[in-house]
Image (cartoon, grey):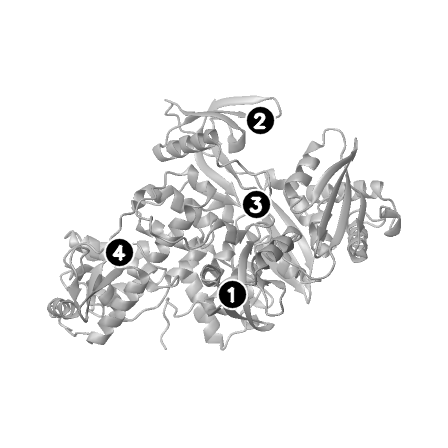
Amino acid sequence: MAYSELIKSFHRIRAYLRSFYVYGFRHRREFDQKSARSYDNERRRVESWLGEYMSFGQDADGRRFFLSVDSRSIPENPLYRAFRAKSFTDWDITLHFHLLDILRADEALRIAEVMDELDRRLASFERAALPDESTVRKKLKEYHNLGLIRTEKRGRETLYRRSEDHVSLERWDAAAAFFSEAAPLGVIGSYLGDRLARRVPWFRFKHHYILNALDSEVLLTLFTAIRERKRVRFRTARGLFTVVPLKVYIGTQTGRQYLLAWTPRQHFAFYRADLMDSVTLGEAFEAPEDLAQRLETFQAHCWGVTGSGSGPLQRVEMTVHVGPGEGFLVERLEREKRCGQVEQVDETHWRFTAEVWDALELLPWLRTFTGRVSALSCTDERVTQRFWEDFDALAELYGGETDALS
Amino acid sequence: MLFHEIYGSYYRATAAILRQAARGALTGRELTALVQRHGFGESLLTIPDALRGERWLLLHRDLSSALTGEPELPLTTLEKRWMKALLLDPRIQLFDADPTGLEEVEPLFTPDQVVYYDRYTNGDDFQDPGYIARFRTILRALREKSAPYVRFQTGKVKKTQLVVTPHHLEYSEKDDRFRLVAASARRRWIINLGRLEACALSASERYSPLPEADMERVTFELTDRRNALEWVLLHFSHMEKETKRLDEDRYRVTLRYNREDETEMVIRILSFGPVLRVVEPEHMIALLRRRVARQRQLNPGPGGAAREEG
């Protein structure tokens, strides 16, 4: 099949974009592609959509392509462009423009009237042809589902009219520009931006994980299932799952999004959105009476995105030394404590305490206080052991007797 | 459906071409320019031929439109539902978003369905009427390209007041805060909106270009233990970076960061423990050494037991 910039499904390109953007050190032969041509085509597409962000490096193993973006310096997520590359047929685009031109908001038309008008218009082309009525009906039904047209019944007949907007989009220009980067499913905001005469260019975004955009289809299905109280089915590398979706957890420091779900084994579980594939809506779900209460208790002891709600809670205590004029450390503890608590021990010491399902999850955060930790304890000894082992290794790197850097 | 051709670049380019044709102003050159503007890098190989060769029965050979008017595309249900979801977000108060037309629409998601689990808790107060008014004044200044007068706290007690050229409003999801990135004749300013005490449009027409941010590079070697490669690369994925493989499980990563964020970078690097080893610049290594030395003073000597409390 001839190469095209457009794609039918988002699935495969999602993996390529992720690889070019996150990893960037892989060479052509390291991609799990069906064929070398498959890699070449995908790379060519990404270059076509995102050329200005594509870089390459040359080393002994050959050329490697990668996407390099400082997301703080741009007003809009460039990965949204991939969502604008859906393929279509010649009839799809022809009917799109003609049908929305033929139909009016103030007058409903029968299918025969639509076909007659189409016939009249298309006859003016040298390569005149008319699509089947069933093709036109199918397109009208599709556009009805998208909300572009409205239908009404008159007897046994269906009549069609174009949908009418009462939304003043110009009044949304700044909100659309901001939330397209700062709200879930922001790609929809970027579609709204396409409709405006001018995009608002004033916003920038720090700590902005643009890669999350690639999971938009997954998130849309999850939100739909949560709203409709339905199960979802999906596949990960670990197998097939059918669960009840409850919440979407978004990391502002990790670049990851998760589903928090209720599993058939009657416990809670987190699943990474970027590892979920083939996500579909399942059967309706009748929640047990106490699920809301159990969820609240579970969430109250989640540090991040691990734990199942079973097993004993683990208690972590960290005492931090705060010298004169170092109130910023207390500020840090307060703003970053999540489900933990902070109390002053004496003039120069503050204690952070938390009871969580999985204390190992705190390790990265505890390490950020390196240089200040005067005491650390945990009911799970692995936490303190790992913390001090890692510190000893760090000391070897940066401050050991023999300087590892020299 | 989120991934649909009606939102695609080809449809958008074609709509722009048909709009121009309906106005009787389409030329071959204009057609090319519109494809370049709205399409992708290689769209010129496809769209003009499809339109002029009558594969898409939309444009006559004389470049007149086959439609009766300019193309129109009503908002989709998905777009309206996303907008309705925004109306439930506390930050929407900052904007002049008009809810008209969305009364009967169901939101796509609600705030209680989303948990930002690692967001800092001392974010800006988006409900504060004073904050909203100052935010809107800055938005107006950006829209009208005017220079507002601002007064803000630069320290615990010190206050600064000046007229600036606003360039951007920068939002951090982690901090849940806005900062005004602005310029005065002499320098670049980054002002936390939460610290802004007054803001008013001024009569000044002076324009100060934004000086470049002071950028630095840090290079570290990464050892891929405990899935560190993926964790680290995802964590730093929002920065401009280059990664090279050194051998089976070692990688060299170079990141570009803003100098004002140096302390934050040190903290972020520390969070990964010994799987990261900074190799340059020297001053970053010195900052890490200082923290390690200070920790040694608090808990001298290797071994865990002596360090545990109670």
Q: Nearer the viewer, mark 1 or mark 3?
A: 1
Element type where label 4 sits in the image: loop
Q: Which residue is mark 2?
A: B154
Q: CA distance from mark 4 to mark 3?
A: 36 Å
Q: Which residue is mark 4?
A: B73
Question: With respect to residue B33, does A175 lie above or below?
Answer: above
Q: Amino acid at mark 3?
A: Lys
Please tell me in which quadrant of the rendered image residue A275 appears.
bottom right
Q: Are marks 4 and 2 in contact (CB under 8 Å)?
A: no
Q: CA distance from mark 1 to mark 2?
A: 55 Å
Q: Are marks 4 and 3 in contact (CB under 8 Å)?
A: no
Q: CA distance from mark 1 to mark 3?
A: 35 Å
Q: Tell me, yes or no, whether dots 2 and 3 are on the same chain.
A: yes
Q: CA distance from mark 4 to mark 1?
A: 39 Å
Residue drawn at x 60%, y 56% as measured from the top left: A295
Residue drawn at x 30%, y 62% as measured from the top left: B44
